[in-house]
Structures are given as C-alpha cells and as structure tokens.
Image (cartoon, rainbow, N blue to C red):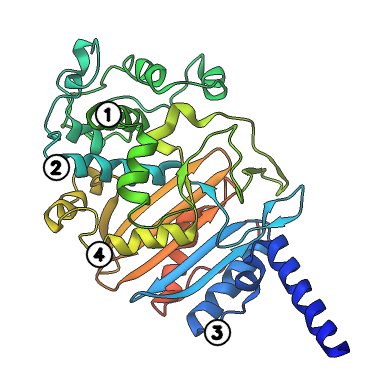
Amino acid sequence: MRNLKTMFLRFAVLVLVFAVTGGHCFAQKRIPDHPIAIKADKYLDALVQQGRFSGSVLLARDGKVLLRRGYGMANLEYGISNTPQTKFLLASLTKQFTAMAIMMLQERGQLDIDDSVCEYIPQCPAPLQPVTLRHLLNHTSGITEFGKPQPENDCFRRTPMTVAAAVERAKQFVPDFKPGEKFAYSSVAFVLLGHVIEKVSGKSYEDYLKENIFGPLNMTNTGLHHQKQIIKHRAAGYARAKDGSISNFDYFNPDYIFAAGGLYSTVEDLYLWDQALYTEKLVKEKTLNQIFTPGLENFGYGWEIFQQKNRRLVRSGGRSFGFSNSLVRYPTEKVTVIVLSNIDTAGAAKIADDLSAIVFGERPDTPDKD
C-alpha cells in the first residue's frame, strides 16, 4: 500500500509540473546531441552571455530538426524563459504571408496582380492609379515607407486604428517615382495589400489567413497581434542601449502595420510554413515560382532571393517594436534557419548567417563583446 501511495504522489507531482510549465520544460532542457546543434548552441550561449541575444532558434536540414531551443527571457520582469513555443511579433516576416494570400487569390481567379490598386480602394487618389498589386508586392510602387519622419508618427504608432483608417492613411502617400522603375521598400504597400485581401475575400485579413494558411498547415500558434488580447506565451519586446542595458520597449499599437508587420508566431510554426513551401499544399508550383522570382534589388513577393557562396538563398527579415527576426532558406540544400528575438538590436540576420555557416560546416564570425 505504501508503494502504491508513493507512486501516486510521484505521478501527481509530474502532473503538477507539466500543468505549471505547459509541458515546455522537457523540450526546453533537452541537451542538443547533433554535432551541428552543439556548435550552434555554444555560439548562441556566447551571445546570451554578452547580453546580445534573447529569443528562440530552429535549425533544420533535409526535413530533420537539428536544434530547437529558447535562449534568454521571454519576460525579464517575471523571469519567464524563452522556449520553442514562445510567440514573437514577426514584424516584416508578416509580408511573406500577405504575399501568399494575394497569390492564392490570383490562382483562384479572384484578382489579377496586374490590376491597379485603385480597383480595390474607395475614392482612390489619382497618383495611385498607375500602381498595380504587382508593384506593391515587389516594392516598386514608389510609395513612401512608414518609417520616414512624420510629425504625427508617435501618436499614430500608439493609437488603436481600424483597417479602414490605416488605408486612409496609406492613401495619402504619393509615389516618389514612376511605379515599376525603381525599388523602394515599403510597408505602406503591404497595408494596402492587406485591405485588398479583405475586399476581395469578404473576410478579415486575420480570418482569411487562418482559414487558408494557418489552419491547413496546423499553425496553431500564429495569428494577428492585438495589443489588448491575452496571448499565452507571448514574449515582451525589449530595447538594448549602447551600454548594454536592457529596457522595456516603448508602448505601441501594431494596428496600423497589420498586413505589413502585425503577425506573431513561433519557430515551430514557421518551420511548418517553411516545409509547406516545398509542396503544393497552398498553391501550385507555378505560383510558387512567381513568388520566388527575384526582381529589382533581388526581391520577389515578400522574400529576398539571391546567391550567397554559390548557394541559392531565400530570406525574409523584420525588426520592429522590440523584436528582430530572420527566416533563412537554402532550398537546394533543404536548410532552414529561423531566428526570433525579443531584443530589437539582436541582429537576427547576422545571427542567421552565422548559424547557416555552422550548418554548412563553415566557421561563423566569433561573437565579440561590444
């Protein structure tokens, strides 16, 4: 009887631990056993010790995950660690999902990316008439980026905003050059694309992505960031000063960048997305080829595509409101590197490049102290 009671108590303790941690502790504390993972883990630990990185990382090759770990803190004030299930604001990684949604609508015959954006915007101003959806997708519209100094910028970033209000705001931007002639990165363009998705589908941007991308791919930890919504396991965003000190990032409301930078996700969900891009689960190969065909400045639709060390590299990055992220794909070698950080100056793109070097057996740059 005593042994039975002991077994019951041990079982109860295990259940309690699992309930409190959400089951994350076991995956989080697993020590990497692959040689590549061991080297990558050592590299990342050095960055953490220097206070230069906090986030989650996933490395994979040939459909096998080599490393999947959290580093540093998701919330410093409560001492909550980052895990592979921690949710990060994606910032501009959002754009690849917006681009996919537009291309899905084209493949289904619901729009044509050579349509003028004015076909979908009420009271569209004359300067936007020559701008097509294609121009918006590949950053050749000439429309100014949100980041340029504007007197009302601070208030604009902090105030709740509807999609309609964000579009009205975007309509005020006049192209700086003839659409199609030059490249100029623009989040405003993707705000307009988000509106087009809603207009054509009859659904909210969030619902359309859930029903057509996140749901089919079982991306259950991905969605549109809402400031007031309770989102379990959401990381707080932090700013790192030049002296190395960490502080909470200023309050913001991401409504105005919704389809340009408003999604959140995890490294695990992004890996599901990455793997789906090798298949026709979402769109046909012909459409995927369009998405991944580089145009001016090596940009496709939501992705940057170029050659690096004689390898085809497809990448997307984003930095905003206390977060720095990078999703890197080497399609030929089937290599994926995902870096999500909740420190705005983490330099996720540089970290992803170094981790890629480790995966390919090359020597990354040694993390030096500031």
Disc 3, disc 2: CB below 8 Å?
A: no
Label whose residue precedes the other's in the sequence (3 or 2): 3
Q: Which circle marks residue 33 in the picture?
A: 3
- Identify the residue position indicated by label 2 in the image: 108
Label whose residue precedes the other's in the sequence (1 or 2): 2
> Spatial distance from mark 4 to mark 3, Cα to Cα?
27 Å
Quarter of the figure with residue 338 = bottom left
Q: Residue at x 48, y 80 (%)?
A: 36
- Identify the residue position indicated by label 4 in the image: 278
The amino acid marked with disc number 3 is Asp
- Horizontal relation, residue 142 to residue 222: left or right: left
Q: Residue furthest right?
A: 2
Q: Residue at x 61, y 51 (%)?
A: 233
Instruction: Pinpoint residue 31: horizontal percent, then vertical percent.
Output: 62, 79
Q: Which circle marks residue 202 in the picture?
A: 1
The amino acid marked with disc number 4 is Tyr
Q: Quadrant of the C terminus?
A: bottom right
> Spatial distance from mark 3 to mark 2, Cα to Cα?
45 Å
The amino acid marked with disc number 2 is Arg
Q: Work out whether 169 lies above or below 226.
A: above
Q: Residue at x 33, y 25 (%)?
A: 144
Quarter of the figure with residue 65 = bottom left
Q: Which circle marks residue 79 in the picture?
A: none
> Could you say which is closer to the camera, residue 245 or residue 272?
272
> Spatial distance from mark 1 to mark 2, Cα to Cα?
14 Å
